[in-house]
Image (tube, rainbow, N blue to C red):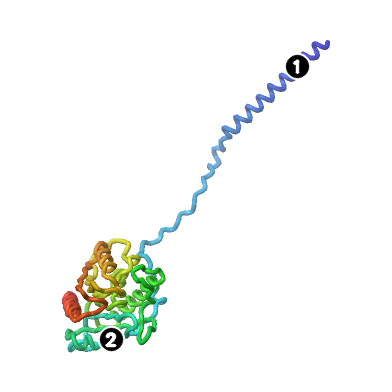
């Protein structure tokens, strides 16, 4: 009886184990293959990210909004036998560090007899007896970031002025910009960052910070840039200026450099003759 009871108990346990194993197998099967949804029920759609609205293609916004830039004061003169009401070529001549617009007033009235409207902007910062366009951090060719940012902003304000004056005053073609020292730097930067505003640039003893060279190659009708520089200039050294001209040329701008042997940081009589010849040719190209 004991043997039969143990055998019966063992058999019962075997039946239970088999049932458990079959249940476990059934559970595993259900995990691997869940029941399909009813045919009439729509399949659940996989979640999708909402479609982004397609923005219309447009040009990149300018770095400086006109409303955030200072309004530059200026002196206006007319050369030759022109009148202010005439449609005239516009020359924007930018003074250097600590100077004033009047520094170039007699220079044009005495030496330039071609009818033209000459705009003489006043620097945005008082400096000594005159004004400046930015605070100098030397050595200037190191391109202190704060100084370069101030240079770029002043050049943007000059571009704003030229856009406005071209609309307000009867003007032949686009303005020609030039300047000495800081004014030469402003001329370089306007040509590099706002080439659409001008027809030509003549930087004198100026320099273009490498950070302000255009990133992309420029195409189309670009302004002609002719830089004048002495090879003995210790304030604004020749080599960084040469590199800037080469960088502009590589980006598609018509840039060249005229070098004057033995000339320091000055605007010599020889340079002035060359300057007026370049201005005359630039005006002829506007006709």
Residue at 28% of width from left, 86% of height from top?
A: 103
Mark 1 → mark 2, Cα distance in angstroms: 119 Å
Q: Quadrant of residue 203?
A: bottom left
Numbered mark located on residue 231 in the image: none
Q: Nearer the viewer, residue 187 or 204?
A: 204
- In what element is the residue under mark 1? helix
Q: Which quarter of the image is occupied by the C terminus?
A: bottom left
Q: Nearer the viewer, residue 44 or 10?
A: 10
Q: Earlier in the sequence, mark 1 or mark 2?
A: 1
Q: Marks 2 and 1: in contact by CB < 8 Å? A: no
Q: Which quarter of the image is occupied by the N terminus?
A: top right
Whether residue 156 sits left or right of residue 85 in the image: it is: right
The nearer-to-camera label among 1 and 2 is 2
Report x, y in % for residue 209: 33, 68
Q: Nearer the viewer, residue 56 or 110?
A: 110
Q: Residues within 10 Å of mark 1 (few under 14, many from 20)?
A: few
Q: Quadrant of residue 55?
A: bottom left
Report x, y in % for residue 196: 28, 71
Q: Which residue is situated farthest in the right direction here?
A: 1
Q: Which residue is mark 1?
A: 10
Q: Is residue 272 visible?
A: yes
Residue at 28% of width from left, 75% of height from top?
A: 184
Q: Nearer the viewer, residue 81 or 52?
A: 81
Report x, y in % for residue 69: 39, 77
Q: Is residue 200 visible?
A: no
Residue at 37% of width from left, 72% of height from top?
A: 138
- In what element is the residue under mark 2? helix
Q: Residues within 10 Å of mark 2 (few under 14, many from 20)?
A: some
Q: Which residue is mark 2?
A: 103
Query: Is 247 located above or below residue 274 in the figure?
Result: above
Q: Quadrant of residue 92?
A: bottom left
Residue at 65% of width from left, 28% of height from top?
A: 24
């Amino acid at each position: 009886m004991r043997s039969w009871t143990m055998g019966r108990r063992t058999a019962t346990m075997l039946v239970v184990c088999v049932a458990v194993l079959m249940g476990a197998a059934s559970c595993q099967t259900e995990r691997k293959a869940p029941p399909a949804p009813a045919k009439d029920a729509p399949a659940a759609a996989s979640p999708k990210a909402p479609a982004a609205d397609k923005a219309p293609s447009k040009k990149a916004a300018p770095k400086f909004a006109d409303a955030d830039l200072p309004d530059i004061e200026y002196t206006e003169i007319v050369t030759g036998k022109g009148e202010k009401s005439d449609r005239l070529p516009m020359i924007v001549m930018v003074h250097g560090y600590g100077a004033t617009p009047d520094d170039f007033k007699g220079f044009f009235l005495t030496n330039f007899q071609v009818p033209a409207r000459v705009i003489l902007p006043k620097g945005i910062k008082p400096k000594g007896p005159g004004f400046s366009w930015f605070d100098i951090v030397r050595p200037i060719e190191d391109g202190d970031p704060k100084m370069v940012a101030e240079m770029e902003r002043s050049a943007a304000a000059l571009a704003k002025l030229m856009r406005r004056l071209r609309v307000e005053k009867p003007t032949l073609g686009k303005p020609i910009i030039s300047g000495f020292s800081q004014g030469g730097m402003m001329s370089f930067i306007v040509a590099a960052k706002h080439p659409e505003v001008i027809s030509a640039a003549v930087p004198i003893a100026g320099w273009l910070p490498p950070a302000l060279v255009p990133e992309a190659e420029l195409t189309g009708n670009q302004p002609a840039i002719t830089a004048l520089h002495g090879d003995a200039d210790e304030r604004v050294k020749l080599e960084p200026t040469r590199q800037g001209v080469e960088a502009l040329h590589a980006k598609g701008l018509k840039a060249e450099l005229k070098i004057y042997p033995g000339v320091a940081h000055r605007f010599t009589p020889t340079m002035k003759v060359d300057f007026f010849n370049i201005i005359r040719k630039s005006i002829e190209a506007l006709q």
